[in-house]
Amino acid sequence: VMTIGQFAHASGLSAKALRFYGEKGLLIPDEVDEVTGYRRYAPAQLRRAAMIRVLRRMGMSLPQVGEVLDNPDRCDELVARHRDEVATRYAAQEEAIALGRATLAGYDKPFPVETRTAPAQPWVAAVLDVEPGAPQTEGESARYNAAFAALALALQAAGNAPAGPFWTTFHAGDDGFDGQLLLCWPVSQPVGPDFTVDGLRLRHGVLPERREAVVRLSFDDPLVAGDPSPDPAPHPGLLALMEHLDEAGRAGGDEVRQVGVLDEDGTPCAVDITVTTGPIA
Amino acid sequence: VMTIGQFAHASGLSAKALRFYGEKGLLIPDEVDEVTGYRRYAPAQLRRAAMIRVLRRMGMSLPQVGEVLDNPDRCDELVARHRDEVATRYAAQEEAIALGRATLAGYDKPFPVETRTAPAQPWVAAVLDVEPGAPQTEGESARYNAAFAALALALQAAGNAPAGPFWTTFHAGDDGFDGQLLLCWPVSQPVGPDFTVDGLRLRHGVLPERREAVVRLSFDDPLVAGDPSPDPAPHPGLLALMEHLDEAGRAGGDEVRQVGVLDEDGTPCAVDITVTTGPIA
DNA sequence: TTGCTCCTCACGTCACGTGAGGTGGC
DNA sequence: TTGCTCCTCACGTCACGTGAGGTGGC
């Protein structure tokens, strides 16, 4: 039997840690004096204390340590799992740091914001319900492409083929929980309510003659092309656009259009984030 | 100007985090309503908010984030330093896990404890003052070897050459802060108080006829040979020795001798941790 | 008897999250 | 008017470290 101080010295744990482990039930003193509260530890407890120390040094939490102590036969497995978790966390942090450096570099240098005037433009859109927080999965992406293609074909068949690159806009729902994505094609002629496409919910309208501010997010940009991190930081281009709107005295509440940009091969190579800054003076 | 909710949405930070950052002075709202306490944020603050978010995602603490924001020109340097710190911490944890696994494996299987009887043994020792917490530096090690050698030579010259392998014992000082290391040679004849060696403080005595328990820590053991980790966990052999003493009904307070073990070439290859378990029955 | 150890609170750490309870703004 | 947002406490997290103030044991 040893006092807490002797046991602390022998085990390499602090007396405070020993009291804490006792309180948590991880390492109960061999006996506790009823009157004085003095804790007494047995030499046979040194093994457990040493294991706790080693496991804590590995970075395990106390519940994890307890799990290992409760399942000595699975010790190796649990330790290996912990090592893998640590490695995974480190890899994730490394990636966050690399991505963060790129983002900060983008914030550091001015991002080009183009301003231009645009003529009135009729459009037709397919409406899709989406959850805004949902990640951009492969399946969703295919769904969008199919809807765009079906709408384009129907417009072509109606003799009112798309008159330029498509765009999308997002309308948050009232509850902010889900929302609607509009997949828009510009058309030469406004369509009437009699234009329908099987399986698609349509909407249509006309963008008025207007001034616009645009930033181009290229798919060559690693911040755009990289595998989508969950809940990413604002892209430098979006920041630049916000600041442009601010300096122009416009609130950011206007509708944002994401206009597809194709290269000469017709493959998507960028997206133009486009906001209306006002009517033509 | 935006409400905290709008700004939170735009920056990707939570309203709670924004309040916290305001409280800490990291990101002060553009204005705070005197009456209602409502916070208002300006679009121009989005850049700072985005940077905070990115830096936090990298795993920086808020003081570190503040340092980066205060020194935008050193941003790259500070981020690189953070990355290196993270990598260093991870490497240290990886090493702790590897070392811990080896230690746990040692705890898992029984460690051999030898018991034996030993005859009475006169000894002479050089006394060195040491700080017990101090790491085993190169310089200290050389000092010990020099003292051992000087003592052995003097004994030889006095016709009382070492009669076996050397050992060391450690006596903690009264204050527990420093202590004394005894470097001992066994001798055939007890020495008198007239035996002195220049530059060495000597002590001498006789080990009585006794029973001993011994564990051998081999230098081949990675737990023994590995670079000395600061404040290492108890070696499985020491644990086994403690438990042996416990079962034998002996407290662990007896003097511990660390006896050098040489291979056939005369180079040190192990150390025998030796404790007295009692007189010969 | 004097130090030393041991005891039990209580508070601090770090960056917020999670309610509780109440009010302002559309 | 009803919801919704916003406000300010206050508490919890994790594994102890750091005193404060008081007592037991040699």
Image: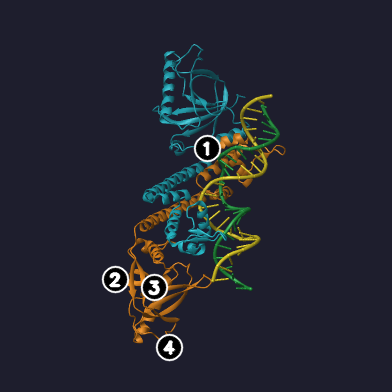
Chain colours: A cyan, B orange, C green, D yellow
Q: Earlier in the sequence, mark 2 or mark 3?
A: 2
Quarter holding residue B248:
bottom left
Specify whether B16 is left or right of A167: right
For label 2, the residue is B263
Mark 2 or mark 4: which is in front? 4
Residue at 52% from the left image edge and 26% from the top image edge: A179
In x, y percent, where is residue A177?
A: 54, 29
| SS of the residue under disc 4 | loop
A240 or B163: nearer the viewer: B163
The CA span between labels 1 and 2 is 67 Å
For label 3, the residue is B278
Q: Are marks 2 and 4 in contact (CB under 8 Å)?
A: no
For label 4, the residue is B194
| SS of the residue under disc 2 | loop
| SS of the residue under disc 3 | strand
- Say above or below: B167 vs D2: below
Q: Residues within 10 Å of mark 1 (few under 14, many from 20)?
A: many
The CA span between labels 2 and 3 is 29 Å
The CA span between labels 1 and 4 is 84 Å
Q: Residues within 10 Å of mark 2 (few under 14, many from 20)?
A: few
The subunit letter for the residue under badge 3 reads B
Q: Are marks 1 and 4 in contact (CB under 8 Å)?
A: no
The label shown at residue A234 is 1
